[in-house]
Amino acid sequence: METKITSVYDEGALVGTQLIGAKGFSVLIETAGSKILFDTGRRGRYLMHNMAVLGIEPDDIGKVVISHGHTSHTGGIRDLLEERSSSLNIYAPRSAAGAGKAFGPKGIRIPKDLSERADVYEVNDWMEISEKVFVSPPMDIAGDLSEVFMVIMARKGPAVISACSHAGVDKVMEEVKKRFGSYPRTYIGGVHIGKKEKEKAKAIAAAFSERDCSNLYLNHCTGIKGMTGLRAELGLKGVSDFYVGSTLLLEM
């Protein structure tokens, strides 16, 4: 059995396609007959466009996981619900729901007319939402926000999907080791490196190397400068871009 991971929303998109690159993050996880969307990007119209180009039907999405409350990760929720004919299970840390409420002014924004289509579940500990697919406990970041990441237990070891890794790549990997007994072999998503944060890029590269996490498919807040900094430490082939339309297959 294989699990397929597809980038649906990112600042970059595959050349020669109709896919749109825009600020935000979303990936689709297809495993054991289910489809899980991790984050929804910033603009609903771009999310819907990219899903259409990729042949992803809104009603085929079984679950949505929201990593944290930043708009570039929650903005597509409304459009996704509007395009569906059935209710949707949404998993998120409390802070992403806004001020401790099911629907608040920050994070997930679901209008009253669509509230019956959304069943929101709070994530406060490890959750297995599909066979061998896990959502992490919330990890504290700036202010009152927290972020969750996802883990897929693949045949060759844990694979992390992390939207931004705000708490720190090292802390994410240590949390995986604590829960599953080994460090991740694969890391997908963003690692939040600023344009002038060369030392941070070096530290993140060292964190990956020290834990033998060598299958890196990065995008979003890693940034172009961040990717360059990581490749300076890990080699040109040490980090792969994971633009919209990119796919990765994991043997389960």
Image: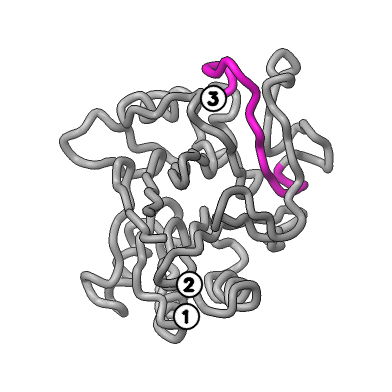
Please say if the residues under marks 2 and 1 sit with CB atoms less than 8 Å apart. no
Q: Nearer the viewer, residue 7 or 220?
A: 7
Please say if the residues under marks 1 and 3 sit with CB atoms less than 8 Å apart. no
Residue 5 against residue 252 in the figure, above or below = above
Identify the residue at the far bottom of this view. 210
Q: CA distance from mark 3 to mark 2?
A: 31 Å
Report the residue marked by disc 1: 207
Q: Quadrant of residue 251?
A: bottom left
Dot 1: within a 10 Å radius of its alpha carbon, few (fewer than 14), some, or many (20 or more) residues?
A: some
Q: Nearer the viewer, residue 1 or 29?
A: 1
- Disc 3 residue type (three-letter): Leu
Q: Position of residue 94 (x, y in %)?
A: 77, 47
- Among numbered discs 1 and 3, the one appearing first in the sequence: 3
Q: Quadrant of residue 188?
A: bottom left
Residue 27 visible in the displayed image: no
Report the residue marked by disc 2: 184
Q: CA distance from mark 2 to mark 1?
A: 12 Å
Q: Is residue 92 magenta?
A: yes
In the displayed structure image, the side of residue 101 where residue 119 appears, left or right = left
Disc 1 element: helix
- Disc 1 residue type (three-letter): Ala
Question: Which region is colored magenta?
Answer: 81-96
Identify the residue at the far right of this view. 100
Q: Nearer the viewer, mark 2 or mark 1?
A: 2
The quarter of the rendered structure image containing the N terminus is bottom left
Report the residue marked by disc 3: 80
Looking at the image, which residue is at 55% across and 73% down? 173
- Among numbered discs 2 and 1, the one appearing first in the sequence: 2
Dot 2: within a 10 Å radius of its alpha carbon, few (fewer than 14), some, or many (20 or more) residues?
A: many
